[in-house]
Each structure stands twice: as C-alpha cells, then as structure tokens.
Image (cartoon, helix red, strand yellow):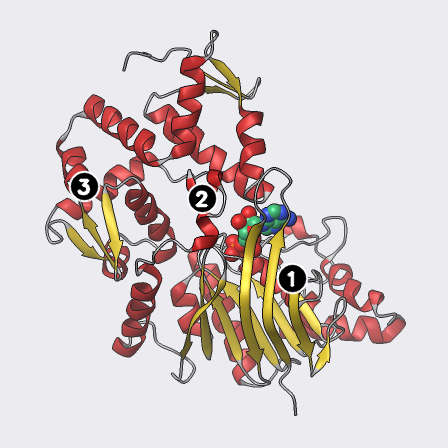
Amino acid sequence: MPPLLEVHNCRQAYHKDSSADLVVLDDVELTLQEGEIVGLLGRSGSGKSTLLRIVAGLLQPTSGEVLWRGQPLHGPAAGVAMVFQSFALFPWLTVEENVELGLEALGIGGKERADRAEAAIDLIGLGGFESAYPKELSGGMRQRVGLARALVVQPELLLMDEPFSALDVLTAETLRTDLIDLWSEKKLPIKSILMVTHNIEEAVLMCDRILVFSSNPGRVASEIQVNFPHPRDRHDPAFRQMVDDIYALMTRRTPTPPAAIASPAAAAGFATPLHPVNTNLLAGLLETIVAAPYAGKADLPALADDLQMELDELFPLGEVLHLLQFAVLEEGDIRLLDTGRAFVDADTDTRKHQFAAALRAHVPLIAAIRRTLDERWNHRAPALRFRDELEDHMSPDYADETLRAVISWGRYAELFSYDEESDQFSLDDIDATA
Ligand code: ADP
Ligand code: MG
C-alpha cells in the first residue's frame, strides 16, 4: 500500500516584479501514513498554510511532486477535507444547511444528505442545534460546525489549519480532547489528520508525529515522534520535557539562510513580518524577568505558566524583545541584555527614548519611515507606499499586520504619528529633535 500522501522536493515561490522571487517553501518532504495524526509546527509566516493548500490540491506548487495514494495530484482530491481557523461558515445558512453544503457539491441529495448531515452533527456534539444560525452559536460551537462540515463528506484525510487558535483557552481544550476521544474510539470516518499549528503544547497533546518547520524558506527541519498514549496529561514530566525540547529546537539560533539575503530589501530587513504586540506587555515582561525568581533569565514554558499565559501568547513577545535586542531567546530560555535591564530601571520618558532608539536601530522599516518623514518638506508620507513595499515580500495579510505593529510601536516611542483617515504618517505632535 502506498502512503496516503507524499510530498517530494516541493518548492513554492512567488514571483515579484520589483525584486527577487519570494521563496516560501523549499525542498519540502512529507509523507502521511494511514492511522496517524501529524502536526506541522512552525512560526507564523513559515509557509504552513501554503503547504496545506498544496496538500489539499488547492495550489499547484512551483515545482515538486504531490502524490495521493501513489498518484500525482492535480486539483482538489476527493478524499481530502479542510477545517479553517476562521470557521468559514455561511451566516445565512443554518447549522444543518452549512453541513450539507459539502454533500451538495458531491451531488448527494434528498434523504441521504439530510441523514448524513444529522449524523455528523450528532457525532460532533451539536445535536439539537440543527436549525440554529452561526450568529446564535459560540465560537467553539461554530468550529464544531466547521468540523462536521468537513467530516460529513467522509474524507480519508482531514486537514486543519490552526483550527483552535481563534477560540478561548477552555473552549479550545474541550474541542481538542473531544476530537482526540472520537479519534481514539475510531468514531471518525477518516484515516489521517494533518494539522497546522504554532502551538507546541497543542502539537504534543494531539499528534503522533510532529514536523517542525523552519522559516525563510519553510522546510521540515526536524521530526519528532510522540508516543504517549491518549488521553495525554499536560503535567506529566515527560510531556513537559518534550515541550521544552521542542522550544529549544525552535529558538535555536540559526545562521541567516542565503534565501533571506538574496534581495537587498530582504537584507535591509523589510522582509520580516512583525506582530503588533502591546508595548505595555513588553515592559511588563521585562520587569518580570528582571525580578525574582528569574533574576534576568527565564525558561519560557515556566514563565508562561507563572504568568498564566499560553506559550503561544508569550512567544511573540519574546521574539520582539529579541528583535529589539532587549533580550535573547536561546535554547528555550529568554535572557535579558543590558539594554533590557536599563529599560526596566528607567522612568517613563527615558523608556520611550530607549524604545525609540531600539526601533530605529533594529527595525529597518521604522528607520525608513522616520527618515522619509524627516526628509520631506511637509513631514508627511502615505502609508500606502510602505504597504506596497512590504507586499513585495509578504502576503497582504502579513503586510497589514506588520504595518499595524509599526504604527503602534512608532506611536508609543513618539517617532511618528499616523492618521487613519488619510492613511498617512507624519511628524505632527512629534518633537522632531528627540
Ligand atoms: P504560515 O501559515 O506559516 O503563517 P503562510 O503559508 O501563510 O505561512 O505564508 C508564508 C509566506 O508566504 C509569508 O511570508 C506570506 O507573506 C507569503 N505568502 C503567502 N501567500 C502569498 C501570496 N499569494 N503572495 C505573496 N506572498 C505570499
Ligand atoms: Mg497560516
């Protein structure tokens, strides 16, 4: 029997007129066997969704081979269904109508369609809500509809793209364990699950095998077998150890790969997507790490536990501190640098100056915006121009997020102002001598 799915030597590049092509995936190898849940774990922007779309047959890779049961895949495979982070339900259709949609596409009608939808809805724990509309449901219930809609077509392979990341912590956990229970009891009409996540604990909780993705370009950097029986216990020392080890793996410092410095703009750091993390949280995190018991260095999973944060929320904060060189992320730890300590000791005004200096030194986009404003006679510049430049290196979504990060940090540091209505940066109300 050939494997359910194979991806060989897969490459995905986006062509850019104004610069070198953006290589999102390079040399990706992936094999899925029947009976396993496989996790694709990687930072945002590493190409996980892109790979999932390739596997689903929704996107033809630039080069490489995708085999479904040993046969080349051209277009969407009948045996594959996908669940999205955003649920993707039709608001004007009831639960049952949303679930039936998949069957309609297969030409299944009448009583069979209704019976199968009913069964999928019951299986996933939504019995009684058949005639409700999505807006009447909680986020967790909406995602159950998303799952029912995927399962009703009885796919062999279920693809899930960060299916729990839009849910609150408790709801997400209930849905994870419900799904794993159904899987363990062999109640799901599927042979294999491939799930994308950037949440390490989620991967260790659910998967038999975890593929850790590297960024720029995305490729499978390591593979981890998870042999703990279900139900798994997050507090089990072996579970904790595995989470720690994967953290270490993901925060290992890697030399800049050649692809990332192929274009001058990438070399200038324009190609790095940024997350708009809150500056108060950044300051709070620095203060926590300086104080006892950490005294300047903390194990990230332990710190997340202590702060009652998901690792997932903490990691982006750590990444920004690393980027600004207030701290370094290494081998699963975060360690404060002198600039980080100085920040903690400073008063509010001094902190703004220090933050501004770090932004100008380490975020080329912010330096470029400020330089442009300084040079222009009216000290104004449309944000569109920077958005365009970003979109040469990342998808519109990521460009948007990056710009939001830049706007909120630049405002806090009083490096520039931004006006939503005119979509303009300016030096209005900014002390330009600072
Ligand atoms: P992930 O799911 O791991 O967050 P994605 O697969 O969504 O990553 O994106 C990987 C990279 O590819 C990102 O840098 C993104 O900006 C870029 N990208 C995705 N789609 C496009 C597109 N249509 N055009 C240009 N760049 C894209
Ligand atoms: Mg994604």
Residue 272 tag number: 2
Quadrant in the picture for the N terminus = bottom right
Q: Name which residue type carries label 3.
A: Glu
Q: Does the rendering let one see residue 430?
A: yes
Separation of disc 3 and disc 1 at Cα?
41 Å
Q: Position of residue 25 (x, y in %)?
A: 55, 60
Q: Earlier in the sequence, mark 2 or mark 3?
A: 2
The residue beneath circle 3 is 287
* Cβ–Cβ under 8 Å for marks 1 and 2: no
Residue sticking out furthest to the bottom = 1
**Which mark is nearer the camera, 2 or 3?**
2
Q: Position of residue 146 (x, y in %)?
A: 65, 62
Disc 3 and disc 1 in contact, CB within 8 angstroms: no
- Viewed as shown, does residue 55 lie left or right of 217? right
Q: Is mark 1 within 8 Å of ligand 1?
A: yes
Residue at the image point whose x is 48% and y is 48% from the top: 262
Q: Which residue is mark 1?
A: 53
Question: Where in the figure is residue 270, as x and y percent of width and height?
Answer: 46, 38
Image position, residue 201 (x, y; %): 38, 66
Q: Amino acid at mark 1?
A: Arg
Q: Which mark is residue 127?
A: none
Q: Quadrant of the C terminus?
A: top left
**Alpha carbons under labels 2 and 3: distance apart:** 27 Å
Q: Amino acid at mark 2?
A: Thr
Q: Nearer the viewer, residue 381 or 4?
A: 381
Q: In the image, what residue occupies the spot 70% across and 62% down?
A: 60
Task: Assess disc 1: are there few (<14), some (14-19) or many (≥20) residues with their C-alpha within 10 Å of its C-alpha.
Answer: some
Whole-Å distance between the Cαs marked 1 and 2? Answer: 22 Å
State whether residue 226 is above or below residue 198. Answer: below
Camera-side mark, 3 or 1: 1
